[in-house]
Image: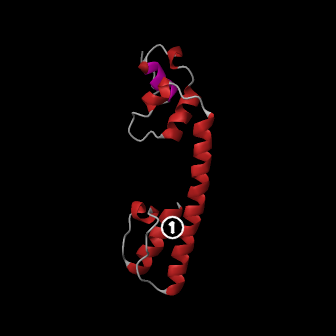
């Protein structure tokens, strides 16, 4: 949300759209704009970097506190599943052997339509 706010500030004042990936780079330099807006953009980026630094610390702590098992390695092969989401899924699901099949697990995850047919 913080990056979206910075993106919006830049776009509104310059008409230039900047990707969040570009904003995340430590060497990012905002385009030329009026001084008050530039200060707001720089403050927004400082807030983002401070928040991200704390998130990184918490993620490292959570990752190192857990005993990683084979299901975690399998979860990490799914596109978009990183360390923290993989840990979350692994901890919330528990032992996957308790499910009779993939359909039962999908139902547990609420990924299956709940319509009942007779």
Specify whether residue 111 is in view. Answer: no
Please name the residue shown 45% across and 31% down the image: 75
Range of magenta residues = 103-109
Q: Residue at x 51, y 81 (%)?
A: 37
Tell me if residue 48 comes above or below residue 92 in the rendering.
Answer: below
Q: Residue reaching furthest top?
A: 100
Whole-percent x, y for residue 80 in the image: 41, 41
Sort mark 1 into few (<14), some (14-19) or many (20+) by Cα contacts within 10 Å: few
Magenta segment, prevailing SS (helix, strand or loop): helix
In the picture provided, is 93 more to the left or to the right than 33?
Answer: right
**Vertical arrangement, residue 107 with respect to residue 28, above or below:** above
Label 1 residue SS:
helix
Q: Which residue is mark 1?
A: 5
Q: Is residue 2 visible?
A: yes
Measured as percent of width and height from the top left, residue 73 is found at: 45, 29
Q: Residue furthest bottom?
A: 34
- Does residue 11 belong to the magenta stretch? no
Instruction: Estimate the x, y position of residue 45 in percent, counting from the top left.
Output: 53, 68
**What colour-coding does the image apply?**
secondary structure
Q: Nearer the viewer, residue 53 or 43?
A: 53
108 in magenta: yes
Image location (x, y in percent) of residue 20: 42, 61
Q: Residue furthest left?
A: 16
Q: State the residue at coordinates (52%, 25%).
A: 69
In the image, taking residue 69 as reference, residue 66 lies left or right, namely right
Res 22 → quadrant: bottom left
Looking at the picture, tell me which residue is in the foreground, 90 or 105: 90
Quarter location, residue 49: bottom right
In what quadrant of the picture does the C terminus appear?
top left
Please tell me which residue is depicted at 47% across the width and 13% down the height of the picture.
Answer: 100
């Amino acid at each position: 949300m913080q990056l979206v706010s910075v993106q919006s500030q830049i776009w509104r004042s310059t008409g230039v759209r900047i990707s969040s990936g570009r904003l995340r780079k430590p060497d990012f330099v905002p385009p030329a704009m009026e001084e008050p807006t530039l200060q707001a953009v720089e403050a927004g980026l400082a807030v983002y970097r401070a928040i991200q630094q704390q998130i990184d610390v918490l993620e490292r702590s959570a990752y190192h506190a857990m005993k990683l098992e084979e299901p975690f390695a399998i979860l990490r092969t799914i596109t978009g599943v990183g360390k923290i989401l993989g840990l979350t899924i692994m901890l919330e699901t528990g032992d996957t052997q308790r499910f009779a099949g993939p359909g039962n697990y999908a139902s547990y995850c609420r990924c299956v339509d709940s319509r009942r047919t007779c």
